[in-house]
Amino acid sequence: MSLNPLAEQLNNTLQQSNVYNMLSTLGKEIYFPKEGILSQSAEASAGAKKYNATIGIATENGVPMHLAAIQDTLSAYKPQDLYPYAPPAGKPELRKLWREKMIQENPALATKSFGSPIVTNALTHGLSVVADLFADEGDAVIYPDKNWENYELTFGIRRHAKIVNYPLFTEDMKFNSAGLREALLAQKDKGKAIVVLNFPNNPTGYTPGAKEGQEIVAAIHEAAEAGIQVIVVTDDAYFGLFFEESLTESLFGQLAGLHPRILPIKVDGATKEEYVWGFRVGFITYAHEDPGILAALEQKTTGIIRATISSGSHPSQTFVLQALKSPDFRTQKEEKFQIMKGRANKVKTLLNSGKYGDVWEYYPFNSGYFMCLKLKTVNAEALRQHLIHQYGVGTIALGDTDLRIAFSCIGEENLEDLFDLIYQGVRDLQQ
């Protein structure tokens, strides 16, 4: 098929860098229409002062039409901040404030060249956009053996990429940067690889320390030097929930501007950072030295959004924007952080008490929502089933030995009872 001229124009810009060769077939074909309904509506909004008959919404008395049954419960917000379509790339003020927040929380970004965050329908959608733009059938997508199962659907099933796993931990329970390096260099013949870095890690709750972070960056840099085009996705879903002895910035900052053959992409969101899981507000951000490349990537990303969900939820974006502007925002976040840290520390105290050491070990955890037990004597799925039916306790079984516990949703005062019941469940199955 012949390419749309707008797609060709974006591709011509991207061909001035290595980014063009990183794109999937769909990534090369996609564009954001500049002469369609949206652009004509935008032109009319600027110039049609008498009657604007372009917008696909209903209005009444100069404001978006709405039902009192809905507006009465949202009366703190103006109708125009709730009911019309949000721009495909998201509300401009929200994008601006999120970018400022990123720099504030990741000082390494202050001197780096990176784009304006583009609003996605939360993290999964952001990862899906990356998959659409960069993953073709057979492309290697590299991430550890302990991972979020949705990566398989997003990259493997949807895009037919080849999933390449490596062990998350070394024998001394540090991040396995050598395994990452080996998996990357194995793609030299293909010349392209997508790497997903998820810290804090789901399911283990592990974030590397500074030295491990340097090793990860060095492994990616070595692959780029070896001629591999490396798309590095930092899945920062649980960003900010760093409780002890770990990196406290996204590796996106260290990767930005590192090498012409490395394209860092940050996928993050308000979902877990701001405790608004159901709002579905996420962001995708690119780092590149060339503003023209960043602009072209934004256009292609917006094209994917337009072709799939058209635009994200306007009310959700408004609610998050309002929170970011609130003078109480940081204080309230710190209060919730301390609750989460208290739960994590309580779990660690319990696990280090010696009460349970005969039946399980635990993988290192220092951040996020989760931790994982490594069962010594019973099957994880058998234990999961037994805990539900015998004790009314829900856990997640991963493989034969690993049991994921979300301490994020258990009050600190109940954690000892929870682990006592899990321990009792193991003892039951041993008999």
Image (cartoon, rainbow, N blue to C red):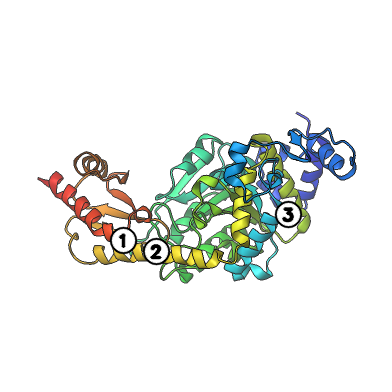
Q: Amino acid at mark 1?
A: Glu
Residue under label 3: 294
Q: CA distance from mark 3 to mark 1?
A: 45 Å
Does label 2 or label 3 sit earlier along the sequence? 3
Q: Amino acid at mark 3?
A: Leu
* Foreground residue among 376 and 194: 376
Q: Compared with residue 289, is residue 396 higher up or lower down, i.e. above or below?
A: above
Q: Is residue 133 left or right of residue 268?
A: right
Q: Is residue 158 left or right of residue 41?
A: left
Residue under label 1: 412
Give yes or no for contact between labels 3 and 1 (Cβ–Cβ under 8 Å): no
Q: CA distance from mark 2 to mark 3?
A: 39 Å
Residue drawn at 43 percent across, 58 percent down: 368
Is the N terminus in the top left, top right, bottom left or bottom right quadrant? Answer: top right
Task: Pinpoint residue 382: horizontal percent, then vertical percent.
Answer: 23, 40
Residue 253 visible, this orientation = yes
Q: Is residue 248 left or right of residue 265?
A: left
Foreground tag (2 vs 3) = 2
Residue drawn at 14 percent across, 49 percent down: 427
Numbered tag placed on residue 319 in the rendering: none
Residue under label 2: 339
Q: Amino acid at mark 2?
A: Ile
Residue 226 visible, this orientation = no
Q: Is residue 297 left or right of residue 123?
A: right
Give yes or no for contact between labels 2 and 1 (Cβ–Cβ under 8 Å): yes
Residue drawn at 53 percent across, 40 percent down: 155
